[in-house]
Image (tube, coloured by chain):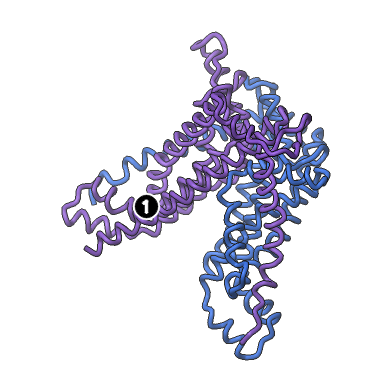
Chain colours: A purple, B blue
Amino acid sequence: MRKNYGPAYAMPVALWISVFFVVPISIIFLYSFLEKGLYGGVVWNFSLDAYRALSNSTFLKVALITIVLSIAATIITLLLALPTAYFIARSAYKNFLLFLVIIPFWTNFLIRIYAWIAILGNNGFLNNFLISTGITHTYTQFLYNPFAVVIVLVYTYLPFALLPLYSTIEKFDFSLIEAARDLGATKSQSIFRVLLPNIKTGITTAILFTFIPAFGQYAVPQLVGGRNSFMLGNIIARELTITRNWPLSSSISMVLTLITTIGVLLFLRLNRSAGMNIKNEKKK
Amino acid sequence: MPKTKGRFSFFVFTTTMVFFYAPLIVLIAYSFNNSKTMHWEGFSLRWYYELFLHSRDLWKAFGNSVIIALTSSILSTILGTLGAIGIYWYNFRFKKYVQITSFLPLILPEIIIGVSLLIFFAAIGLQLGLLTIFIAHVTFNVPYVLLIVSARLDEFDHSIIEAAYDLGAREIDALLRVIVPVSMPGIIAGFLVSVTLSLEDFVITFFVAGPGSSTLPLHIYSMIRFGVSPVINALSVILIAGSIILAFSTKGIYKYIFQK
């Protein structure tokens, strides 16, 4: 028998992740049950205040806005990404078209947000254009609303959704669609009952890659959102750095962590069992 | 096949491309504008002069970004690769623990990692600065390297490693002469992904950076907050051109990674 070197190999990474991920997460879990200190920090008394504060209507409103905006961004992203990925995968110039997707993907995240500020901002391209052509006479406020947040979220995460979709569609055997059509399936039947179930992994990955970062978003609503489009991430940052209520910041972080983890696990499981149903159907 | 094939997908594809490129084209065009506003007043290169000659803070931040990207990627590649090898080849008590805890950072929103690290650094009294940014970057990069190298280990013919052991290779020989060379495409891919993620990261860095330890994304953020600035337009053009050049020059590397 060879010696078991597994622990030696895995120990450095286990230590690193324990100290800089598991311990910090445990600390915010702990802090969420403590009282807040006067100037930030915590007082070591057990308290459920930070969780009670979550039932107040301002917080619930932000939570609702966060869910609505991130679901909207995910749906729009998917509706654009699916046909686009399909087109690229079927094209004779797929390498070049893929390259066109990779350029915005590699462009800095903040530059991509900034591009929209430069266009939609009060002194931006669109306002200058509308005023100089006489269509409008004063500045129109295009930014600082939920629509701006959704547009920029879609713009930011579309490449992340496109790439996994492309790679699964590219591997898909298109003779299956021809077979379905030959056997009398309509065009939409062949897409919904043959293509989509077969590229399920790509769709799941695309949804996760869009929804998770959108749901925990901080930068986009901070830069292009307004009062009515602040998301949970912004509240966490505000409680941490401005209001200095660390227990509240921690309890919101715990909620965000919990929702994301449960969401991901549920989604993966649903997807797995749905995939199995299809296989079973095929067997029948 | 019917002739209408792809008409709808072509339409959506075109929409997506216009959506992708219209903002970038506006940025590029207005970087050559003579005015400080988004009102066209003639061609000029003044914002490029400004960017290259009068933006010392920006270049200092860029330098920080490069240093952190390289150092954190080297460490995360080493940690991640060793971890992947250990998990792949052996069974041990804390294996499940490593698998789960190294998967979680991939699915959690970035802000959670940023906030928890900030609170952690405050709790242990570590001054925020380049060191804390470095630690944070290694932490979010390691899971990616682990994932990518594991995928590579999954692919190749394992009998060559068995053969190495049967022929009397010591562990260190098997590691350096067999396992590492065959996993090299995965290791390089993991390293490149780490560098990219590190250069790109804004949210986590935002929380763990201290005064005077700005990175390029943090510097861009502080400029954007004051509204439209033609210097950012010029910088965007340089960054976009940079990513196109990188995309071309690393094409060979990616080909090597995917073909092996």
Instruction: Estimate how packed mark 1 is, as few (under 14), some (14 to 19) or many (20 or more) residues with alpha carbons within 10 Å.
Output: some
Q: In this figure, which residue is indicated by the disc labeled 1?
A: A90
Which of the 4 quarters of the picture holds residue A115? top right
Residue A117 on image: x %, y %: 60, 27
Which image quadrant is residue A277 in? bottom left
Q: Is residue A132 left or right of residue A277?
A: right
Residue B42 image-quadrant placement: top right
Q: Nearer the viewer, residue A199 or B138?
A: B138
Say whether residue B246 is left or right of residue B255. right
Q: Residue at x 74, y 36 (%)?
A: B219
SS for tag 1? helix
The structure residue drawn at horizontal position 50% and vertical position 43%, both measured from the top left corner, is A210
Nearer-the-camera pick, B126 or B57:
B126
Residue shown at 67%/79% (left/top)? Answer: B177
Residue closest to the far left: A184
Identity, as a three-letter code, of the amino acid under mark 1: Arg
Q: Is residue B153 visible?
A: yes
Image quadrant where one finds the C terminus of chain B:
bottom right
The disc numbered 1 marks a residue on which chain? A
Q: Residue A280 placed where, x, y %?
A: 27, 61
